[in-house]
Image (cartoon, grey):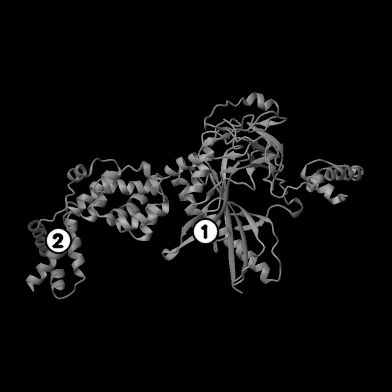
Amino acid sequence: MLSAAEVKRLSMLARLEVRPEDGDRLARELDRILGFVRQLEAAPAGEIEPLVHPLDLAQPLRDDEVREQVDCETIERGAPDVAEGYYRVPRVIE
Amino acid sequence: MKWETVIGLEVHVQLLTESKIFSATPTRYGAPPNTQAGLIDLGYPGVLPVLNRRAVELAVRLGLAIGATVSRRSVFARKNYFYPDLPKGYQISQYDRPIVQGGALEIPLPEGIVKRIGITRAHLEEDAGKSVHDRFPDATGIDLNRAGTPLLEIVSEPDLRSPAEAVAYLKSLHTLVRYLGISDGNLQEGSFRCDANLSVRPEGETRLGTRTEIKNLNSFRFVEQALRHEADRQAGVLEAGGLVVQETRLYDPDRRETRPLRSKEEAHDYRYFPDPDLLPLVLEESFIERIRSALPELPTAKRERFRSAYGLGPYDAAVLTQSRELADYYESARQAGAPDPKLLANWILSEVLAKLNRDHLEIDAAPVPPSALAQLLIRIADGTLSGPLAKTVFEALWAGEGTVDAIVDARGLRQVSDTAALEQVIEETIASHGPQWREYCAGRDKLLGFFVGQVMQATRGRANPQTLNALIRKRRDGSS
């Protein structure tokens, strides 16, 4: 089963808060998901080219042209805190 | 113990496109915050990225120029991490199937040595936005204009053996991307950014030591400083019996030191996987060939041609071919009839570059066009102007006073090579400086310079120096 430390690391990477009392249950559920996916390991995939997309198509390309007008006002309305055109977020300094 | 430094570089080059790599919003630098971030750049639900053909062409151009394998099929992947200036929570990049694989860059080292530096790969990706920490006292400002700007990340092999080699590599790459027209290479605006991986090992050791990654190297000068400090720091740690910790360090140019950036607990795990929104990028042979046939002459080839065709030394050839524009200036002046290839090189390297530097101008904006410089050198060759007079005329040309011949006539700068006229002035000078003349004739050769100076002054610098020297000597030998 996934260890408590692994669950904690996953929650950190996913930026999801896990309450301590939920840790065990979550570990069991994740284990079941991993077990389900692990069935794929039994498939004889040795020589097969990895499939990166289910459709057998190539990426279409577009011309290098500016075509989109940015509607700042509408977009800004979706942000909790805007000042001087910037989106304001809690202070992050590395 | 003697330590060997091992360096590999990752350079992010901003590609010269009008629009973003996956959206049709502009990439222009310096717009008001968030006015160029559209719905795709912001990762709105339901939008789909569509790849910019131009970005692909520019990446292929680099691949061909460094002799790399251009992948006929490459794949875009999501690199997952959370940061406020990354709206989607992932960056679209390329992982195990990049567009460019392998290749090499030749870098010039001192004493004419050329070293081949392997390129591991170059991949296309989108840039993130910008976090602004000094705008608000207790908040970070986010400007997403840069989000989605096309980047080509060029990763070198750990083939560099000193900070100086790292700088030589960066300069060569910088020259190359501008030659190819794939980037403006503007360091201040972040169009050319560098991270370095550095480790040290005892000299003679073949295994690599533990490396650190150094970020924030945004000028060639900082790169050398930062890498030198980091190499010394690692050697110090090892000599004291310690171990180098694999980590990311940030260079602080004010304190001239590197310091750890991210703590170990936060070590990134990007969980790359193929981006389901994008199909594999498939390149037809004809697409690649069309780009190959349009490649310009590359810096190394041009440098070699300047050496062999014009007989220039390695230094002159290297400086003149640093940019396509400067090399074109030189060749235009040659075509306009500048007679002596070496003299032309000297004039450009000293006078023209010094004035450009003084006036903060690029070569394209030089007030003296190549044809005018050629005309000036023609007037030196035909004896109309001496070197010093030519410099006066050059000043006037730079100031926009007209053509070479017009300036020469208007200012009466024509060199006096006429023997009779010069002899006349020499006689007058001797007459007014009798004691010095007698000393000179008695063997004080140093006084030759004095008499040359006097005559130059009397002729306002117009006397032909060679003729003048010869005439004064002749006069002395005749009178003794």
Q: Which residue lies furthest to the right in this view?
A: A21
Q: Name the residue under label 1.
A: B117
Q: Residues within 10 Å of mark 1 (few under 14, many from 20)?
A: many
C-alpha distance separating marks 2 and 1 = 53 Å
| Residue B370 horizontal/vertical position (percent) | 29, 45
Q: Residue type at mark 2? A: Thr
Q: Which of pointers 2 and 1 indicates the residue nearer the eye?
A: 1
Q: Residue B14: x percent and y percent?
A: 54, 43
Residue A87 picture location, percent across and down: 67, 33
Q: Which chain carries label 2?
A: B
Going 52% across and 53% down the picture, which residue do you hit?
Answer: B103
Image location of residue B102, percent across then percent down:
55, 53
Q: Which mark is residue B232?
A: none
Question: Badge 2: how crowded within 10 Å, few (<14), some, or many (20+)?
Answer: some
Q: How many marks?
A: 2
Where on the picture, by quarter, is residue A88?
top right
State the SS at label 2: helix
Quarter of image, res A70: top right
From the viewer's side, name the closer residue of B346 and B403: B346
Q: Residue at x 41, y 48 (%)?
A: B323
Q: Disc 2 marks which residue?
A: B467
Front-most of residues B242 and B425: B242
